[in-house]
Amino acid sequence: MIVKGFLSTNQIRDCEKGCVKLLVKSFPRGGGHIPPRKDATKNKPIMVMPAPKLAVIALSQHAGAPCKPLVQVGDRVKLGQKIGDAEPYISAPVHASVSGQVVEIAEKTLLDGTKALCVVIENDGLDETEEQAAQDYSRLPPSQIAGLIREAGIVGLGGAGFPTHVKTEPRKPVDTVLINGAECEPYLTCDHRLMIEQPQKLIEGLKILMQAVGAGQGIIGVELNKPDAIRVLEQVCAEQSYIRVVGLKVKYPQGAEKQLIKAALGREVPSGGLPADVGCIVQNVQTAVAVADAVVRGVGLYQRVITVAGAAVYDPRNVLVRVGTPIQEVIDYCGGMANPAAIVAGGPMTGKLIQDLTAPVTKPLSGILVLSKDEVDYELNLPCIRCARCVDHCPMGLQPNYLADWSSKGLYDQAKRNHIMDCIECGLCSYVCPAKRGLCRSIQAGKQAVRAGKTAV
Amino acid sequence: MNAKQELWAPVIRAKDTIPRIMFDVVLALIPCWLAGIIFFGFRAFWIVLLSAVTAVLAEALFMRYPLRLRSVFGDGSSLVTGLIVGLILPPTVPWWIPVVGSVVAVAIGKLVFGGLGNNIFNPALVGRAVLLLAFTAPMVKYVRPFDAVTEATPLLTMRSFDWALIWGNVSGSIGETSVIAILIGAAYLLYRRIIDWRIPVGYVITAFAAAYVWDLDPWVAVTAGGLLFAAVYMATDMVTSPVNPMGRLLFGCGCGLLTIMLRKYTSFPEGVTFAILTMNALVPLLDMLTVPVIFGAERSREQRFATTAAVALVIILAWGVLFAINKTVPEGVPVTAEGVYLPLVETLGTDVYETATINDKVYYFTGSREAPEKVAVVGAEQGYHGPIYFYLVLDGSGRIEHLQILTHSDDPGLGSLITRRSFLDQFIGLDTAELAMDVDIQGITGATISSRAVIRGVTGELERFQEAFYGGEEADAGAGYADGVYTAEASGFGGPVKVEVTIDQGKILAVAVLSHRETPGISDEAIRLMPQRITAANSPDVDLVSGATLTSRAISEAVKKALAQATRTEENGANAKEPAVDISSIPDGVYRGTGTGFGGTIVVDVTVSGGKITAIDIVEHADTQFIAQAAFSQMIPAMIEQQTIAVDVRASATLSSKGLLEAVEAALTGKEAK
């Protein structure tokens, strides 16, 4: 039973009796309810998928400069060994997700259809690792924590793939580390299961991050449609006074960084700014768990939990997959598919359509949705009737109907003046549009044009 | 509706579609349609249906939709337009009005702009505006519910709030009268999130406040004249309203303000149509000025001024529109010398009326000169600073139906308070006999002179009306005057003119001018001819002699006054003179008596039995048949029932009545007829 209220020491004691009282928050502007469609997988424990025969490790699985390979064809590599790295600050190394021999270093098709350099390793089935002793991180200085995080190749596992170590070295003072357990996209339940099954690691990761940035409090924001996760986390957090769980109203896009900060902390990240500007950093649940593994056990990031769901896949489930596993194999592991109308990497709102099923799993992938015709809605681009539902629902307070119109007409200057760059690309505008217009798509194209420096067609 | 289907993120979408939204609006309009059918009958049903069908077919044909049942409706927006066009028409319109209105609404209101989503103006209102301006007469012909009697809308007839406005039992357009029906529809639209509450709420509240400020009853202003219907169904049209929340609020407020201003200062009684059309034109500007502050941004300096600019814009535009409209008065429409429009069609209830100049005054009336139904006239009276012009509408018998002040020059807050409805409403229902300051009409404190001027003016007009149409006191058709010689005088050009009128046998025998001070040479003709004419016509209402108008008029007025004496004395005398007759002492039998009626003697036979009158039979009479018969059938049963001669005479048949009484009295007392 979750009741609105204020967290106090008495209430923490109540937690132990099984009654959870939470602070329930939300962001005030825009947002909308989307049916979660999570019933198929939210109660299924994470299953470990066996390693693939061939692991295709992309050399660019993050935002920032791509890695250069550190191995050559024919080299033997161990599980978790670093096989690619880059020099620039904003980058992260990649690691082998199987032990075996490097058989190919070539361009392969990735999830979004582009081709990039990949290291292909043939699995010898041994899963040989390099032994690491557990580290006591409590004495480590922040820069060293950041270094460990980088070495482990940890990037934002919520989907953005931003190198985590950069976030742990903010330019401004930070007092809060906020863990994003909202998971507001439909179908996805990987973070949810992780919170239930590995809460201690999550808290551990949170503490490490807090130490790395020097934050005094840690908050885990969880949407109210995950009461089991909330209960588990509350109990684990009960021991610490500086870490707590905040309940979040179920509203899309609660998991968007700016909206999360606004809801959990009441602070508004300024336009064009970063969370550090308001004194906090945000990390995904899985990222925090990976940080714990990296800093305490020195384990490189080579696997992650994803949700495989959709009506067209026979056995939807949450799977721990090795990076580099071809998508087709993951789907086969989940029973195979039947007449999919679309296969989406990520969530249905922001995910991209997968063109080539031989593409490998990369670090930022959060889910594979194998959707049937009934689950999918097409873009119709009927005339805009100025119903302003997009304006009402935009969490950033923009006017998507106008922005999309200007973008498609090439009036990029006009769009820029009207804050098109503030769009977080959540897709809610397209979702609510009764004319089924491609608003988010047009705005994304407009943003690209503005970034490329175009002013007008 | 061939839409290219593509798949792109987001791959899921909300369930609502444009046809679904349109269908919801149709559902929300059904209560209004039903109310219209209940109040105005099946005609209302057919008009709205015809309008809807025409709109759908018009769009289907213009857009070349395949004429199959599934696809002819298109996206459903033409159905909504057609229904609304029908619902805002009076129930009396001929069949071609909804057809023309719908075609114009769809073709010119929407399609020429580029179809759904591209039009600037509300299509239904474009249709209505064209109809109003091109075919005004059928568009303002309103009727009462149920009995379909022509009646102006409550805006003109209702001075203060009445619950009939809520149920809808008032005259008006088909779907606009019932507040209850509109609110049901509004509740549904709000529940389905189709309309933004800011527009109707802003509209109604601003209209309420504006009506109060401009001295109109705010409750009537808001519930009558289709304001609520417009606020819920027409101002909220998504395509033609702003997208930003603040923009919508200002849009609604602007519509409310403009509606009231247009009602107050222009000839459009409802004001709604052009208020919304004007605000529609402002929408792009409102959108620009009310852009919300985005997440994480500070309110920029431009934005801080933007809302103020938007509000100022609405107000300035309202005044501008008012100024422009006030300067242009429709052609061929009656105006006073000051250029003020007279709401003749609305108050007379028809655009077919007579105009006559009687005694130098212009009267607009329906019915005939002899038996007018409604009469409208403009009067003037000197107020405190200058003349007060007022517009008066009377019914056939001289009862006041409508009074409004047209222009005046008195002080605001003092004399100008005579324009208050609370003052003017006191006149409604009164006629000449009842008007006296501070007895029947409460003057306005601090504006005594102005109040008195209005009362004087209205009284004067009432008297002039009686003289113009009935020649003095209400004389019976065919009734004569009391025999005798009467003198009276009236003001001529140089002084009083005294006349002597001789009545014989109930008719004017001779008229003589006894004394005068008129200009010799000029007035001779009048003094010679007027008596002749008056005698010949048996009425003082004859053509005046040209070149000597004032003298002629004086003679005529004097004769009128003399005749008034004749009728009055007759009236007062007759009833008072009846001596009581003791019927019970009369032995049984049949008695004959005679009396003098209008055209000759009346002979009656009175049967007395057991001390009571049991029968009165008319043996002969020489009066106008139907008039005398009316008198006899009223009075004879009364005399028998009340067993007395002292019964009421029949109005408009005075002489016949008195002749009958005379005859019966003569029969009973054994007197011979005079």
Image (cartoon, helix red, strand yellow):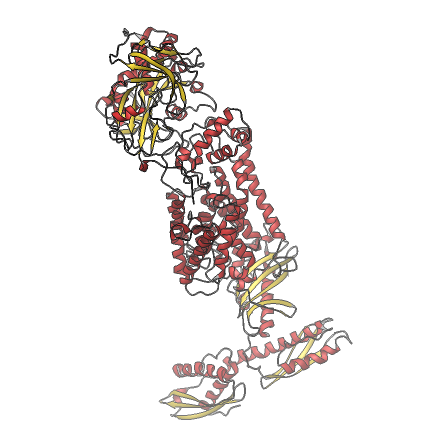
Quadrant (top left/top right/bottom left/bottom right) for the N terminus of chain B: top left
Residue drawn at 33 percent across, 6 percent down: A139
Residue B125: tell me if it is visible.
yes
Quadrant of res B339: bottom right
Q: Position of residue B633 (x, y in %)?
A: 43, 82
Q: Is B541 on the left or on the right of B65, as rendered?
A: right
For the view shown, which residue lies furthest in the left direction?
A17
Q: Is A369 on the left or on the right of B127, as rendered?
A: left
Residue B291: tell me if it is visible.
no
Q: Is A290 on the left or on the right of B411, as rendered?
A: left
Residue drawn at 40 percent across, 29 percent down: A426
Quadrant of res A324: top left
Of residues A83 and B243, the one nearer the viewer is A83
Of residues B167 and A296, the one nearer the viewer is A296
Q: Position of residue A36 (x, y in %)?
A: 31, 32
Q: Is residue B395 above or below residue A372?
A: below
Q: Is residue A243 above or below residue B257?
A: above
Q: Is residue A136 above or below residue A176?
A: above
Q: How many marks?
A: 0
Of residues B255 and A156, the one nearer the viewer is A156
Q: Is B149 on the left or on the right of B558, as rendered?
A: left
Q: Position of residue A156 (x, y in %)?
A: 37, 19
Of residues A303 and B571, the one nearer the viewer is A303
Q: Position of residue A336 (x, y in %)?
A: 26, 29
